[in-house]
Amino acid sequence: MVDASNIHKGDTKSAWISYITYQTAAYLESYVEEELDNADNPNLFKFSYNTVQEAFQKASIQTGVFIKPHFLRTIFTEKCTQAGIEGKYIDAFCGRIPKKVLEANYTIYSPQSLRLQYDKVEDLLTLPFSVDEES
């Protein structure tokens, strides 16, 4: 789980918490160690919206599959459905729960409750390779 509550606050949505697979955690840990060791700048992620869009375009060309960030959300939603996760939890994972609903129903949407739901889908989200194989 990553607490992102202080990262983004928009007009309609704000960041709260995110769950990442153990594989993603390994990539992130490696990246953080490298960036913190080699950086004078305290910003951990040094890329812009355009950089992300270019990366998705490059991946689309390499794979022959048209990929955009929203496509990944669609895949995630489908995997959650396959794992038997209720729609209200899928909406929470995708950031579609208004802040007032979260506050009023904290027990349902607590990090612990969401973790139990995420555990159901994590195995469906793993990649067929590991950080070690990529290096």
Image (cartoon, rainbow, N blue to C red):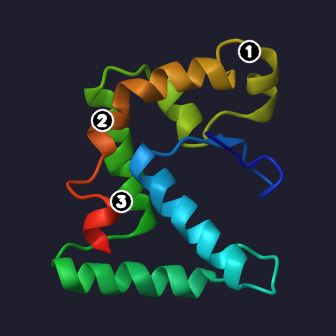
Which sits earlier in the primary sequence, circle 3 or circle 2? 3
The residue type indicated by label 2 comes to Asp
- Badge 2 marks a residue whose secondary structure is helix
Asked where in the image residue 71 lies, by quadrant, the reply is: bottom left
In the displayed structure, would residue 101 be above or below residue 52? Answer: above
Q: Residue at x 27, y 79 (%)?
A: 60
Which sits earlier in the primary sequence, circle 1 or circle 2? 1
- Badge 3 marks a residue whose secondary structure is helix
Q: Is 32 situated left or right of 57 in this image?
A: right
- Residue 6: % across, % down: 83, 52
- Foreground mark, 1 or 2, reads 2
State the separation of the CA atoms marked 1 and 2: 27 Å
Say which residue label 3 marks: 71
Q: Residue at x 16, y 79 (%)?
A: 64
Q: Is 9 situated left or right of 29 in this image?
A: right
In the displayed structure, would residue 13 be above or below residue 101? Answer: below
Q: Which mark is residue 123?
A: 2
The residue type indicated by label 3 comes to Phe
Residue closer to the observer: 80 or 104: 80
Residue closer to the observer: 10 or 7: 7
Q: Quarter holding the C terminus?
A: bottom left
- Foreground mark, 3 or 2, reads 2
Say which residue label 1 marks: 105
Q: Residue at x 69, y 85 (%)?
A: 38
